[in-house]
Image: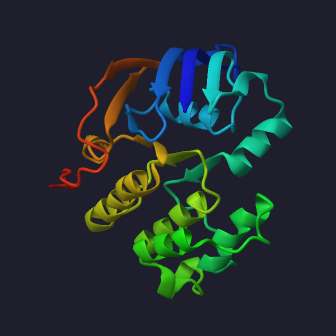
Amino acid sequence: MIEIHGLTKVYETGEVPVHALRGVDLRVAKGEFVAVVGPSGSGKSTLFHILGGLTPPTSGGVFINGRDLLRMSDLERTELRKTHVGFVFQKYNLLPTLTAEENIEIARDIAGRSSQPLDKDFQEILQHLHITGRMHHKPRALSGGEQQRVAIARAIVNRPALLLADEPTGNLDTENSEAVLTILRDLNARLNQTILMITHNPEAAAYAHRTVRMRDGRIVDESLPGASPHDTNRPKIGG
């Protein structure tokens, strides 16, 4: 699903260039749940933005589902984001004037799929997310955990090949953090959804199959694959 070879990113923001990524190599298989951990400034957020087609790399090979991001135009990267990649952010990024249902529907509108009825599987996913009774509420009427579950539904409504999650529990308490991470793990198992999650929290990373550690723009360590994708015996956040 993801193949990265010698990836670099240099920001020319002043007199001294900033080397955010320094020759990153990474492979993520279809259906794998991978956590990328590291301190601030390690390069993990830059990696996230490049994989999502939000920032172009400086050099190296970056392939998403066989498509070369380095050779894509801005328009092609936009199409990639519409149809092949789903995003979950720390701050939810829901539109405050829209209901939960409308926030999900707008992702279908952008992808040109609003005329297609929601399939039965997605209706079951909404029930699994425990938001079916909150679909007509606007974000201000939802708890943080509910907002993040709506954001997850929006991210997967178009069945993206890759789900990118950037600190998805960063604004949540322990109970809601565990719930969101369990949902991500279950979606991975239920849909064979490929997930790459950025996190600073090793307890959150333990929900993934594999953990990649970054420092100073490089991958410095990589754990061996952990439990089965269907194993529900995961550590609890704060536990």
Q: Quadrant of residue 208?
A: top left
Q: Where is residue 21 in the image (x, y as percent from the top left)?
A: 54, 19
| Quarter the N terminus occupies | top right
- Residue 95 in sight in this render: no
- 186 or 76: nearer the eye? 186
Q: Quadrant of residue 73?
A: top right
- Tell me which residue sits at (55%, 29%) in the image: 2
Work out which residue is located at the far left of the displayed protein and give it. Answer: 239
Task: Indicate left or right for 202 with 127 as reference.
Answer: left
Q: Where is residue 156 in the image (x, y as percent from the top left)?
A: 57, 58
- 198 or 62: nearer the eye? 62
- Tell me which residue sits at (32%, 59%) in the image: 182
| Numbered circles on residues, count | 0
- Tell me which residue sits at (45%, 74%) in the image: 146
Task: Indicate left or right for 83 with 34 as reference.
Answer: right
- Residue 62 in sight in this render: yes
- 181 lies above or below 65: below
- Tell me which residue sits at (68%, 76%) in the image: 102
Task: Indicate left or right for 16 with 185 as reference.
Answer: right
